[in-house]
Image: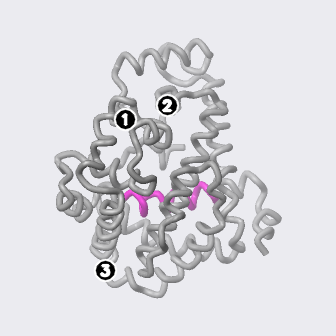
Amino acid sequence: MAGAWRKVWGMSEELGRVRQLWHLLEPVHAVLYYAPEAFEEAAALGYGVDERWPSYFAWRAAPLGAVGADRVGETFYSFSPGMVGAYVPGVWSVASPDAVLAARGRAVDRAYRTLLGEAADAPDTAEAAALLRRVAEAADTADRPLAAANAALPWPDAPHLAVWHAATVLREHRGDGHLAALADAELDPVEALVSFAAIGAARPEVFASRGWGDEEWRAARERLEKRGLVAGDGTATEAGRALRAEVERLTDEAAAGPWRVLTDAERERLVALLGPLWVAAIGSGLLPSENTLGIGKV
């Protein structure tokens, strides 16, 4: 039955569905980085909460253990080394990875009970969790460090926590595959952002959150211009758009494998089940309307 999807859907349609599911799941995961409950848990650990980055680096890197800046830079990829070094390994002097993971679970629990209310424990949420767990457990995490680290954590029992955990494994699985696609395209971290901005995924100002200075951004744009990927005004050339399209295709392709464990009917059912969770996350007003992932634009 797992092969039915591929028989019914052509490859481009299949990858479109994979992208659709990512767009549904990404807000479910990302609420952690913006929810007031998460900042409260971070403050209780001792992290500064005037900005989101101390807790962001702690929440996201904790499954890797008490790793240093080089490891975080490699796995997060798009952040400047200077920005990573400003927070890592310092975050581990505030709280251990185990303490961070425990607080992360509490933050997700509180945030989603606020967002979902009684729906957190509803049968539909449990059904979504069961389907997503099958997909997440089917993910090949070899050479995917963030996905592997999250997949190795115990599965939570509560349905809303299981949904979040699965969403996290799958988004990191996709992200790890995306880095491989960027490497194939010979785009270094700042070039990846410049080329993404060049196709209109988000304004360059949005990507400034990754810590690259103006001179680093200009130098990357000049390198891409020499490759014929970016025009003098910073917009992508036809070759630049084609390269980014190939990066996205390879990313979708690398992310597709786990989803093939579901039948067509199960996939459609999951889309329906995730709809209310997506609406709750988007409707919360917590998430930025423009983001570095280009969701809603590419």
> Which residue does the numbered mark 2 point to in the structure image?
189
Residue 156 in percent (x, y) is at 44, 76
Give the quadrant of residue 148: bottom right
Residue 164 in percent (x, y) is at 44, 68
> Which residue does the numbered mark 1 point to in the structure image?
210
Tell me if residue 66 comes above or below residue 163 in the rendering.
above
Q: Nearer the viewer, residue 276 or 61?
A: 61
Q: Residues within 10 Å of mark 1 (few under 14, many from 20)?
A: many
Q: Residues within 10 Å of mark 2 (few under 14, many from 20)?
A: many
Amino acid type at circle 2 is Pro
* Image depth: mark 2 or mark 3 in front: 2
Give the quadrant of residue 87: top left
Q: Is residue 25 magenta?
A: yes
Magenta part of the protein: which range?
17-30
Disc 1 + disc 2, Cβ < 8 Å: yes
Query: Which residue occupies the extreme bottom position in the image?
Result: 123
Q: Is residue 52 left or right of residue 233?
A: left
> Which residue does the numbered mark 3 point to in the structure image?
117
Q: Is residue 290 left or right of residue 18?
A: left
Q: At x 57% / y 61%, what residue is drawn?
A: 21
Residue 122 in percent (x, y) is at 42, 86
Amino acid type at circle 1 is Arg
Q: Considering the numbered disc 1 on the image, is that residue within a helix, a strand or a loop?
A: helix
Disc 1 + disc 3, Cβ < 8 Å: no
- How far apart marks 2 and 3 lie (CA) works out to 39 Å
Q: Nearer the viewer, residue 221 or 96?
A: 96
Q: Is residue 137 magenta?
A: no
Q: At x 59% / y 54%, what residue is drawn?
A: 19
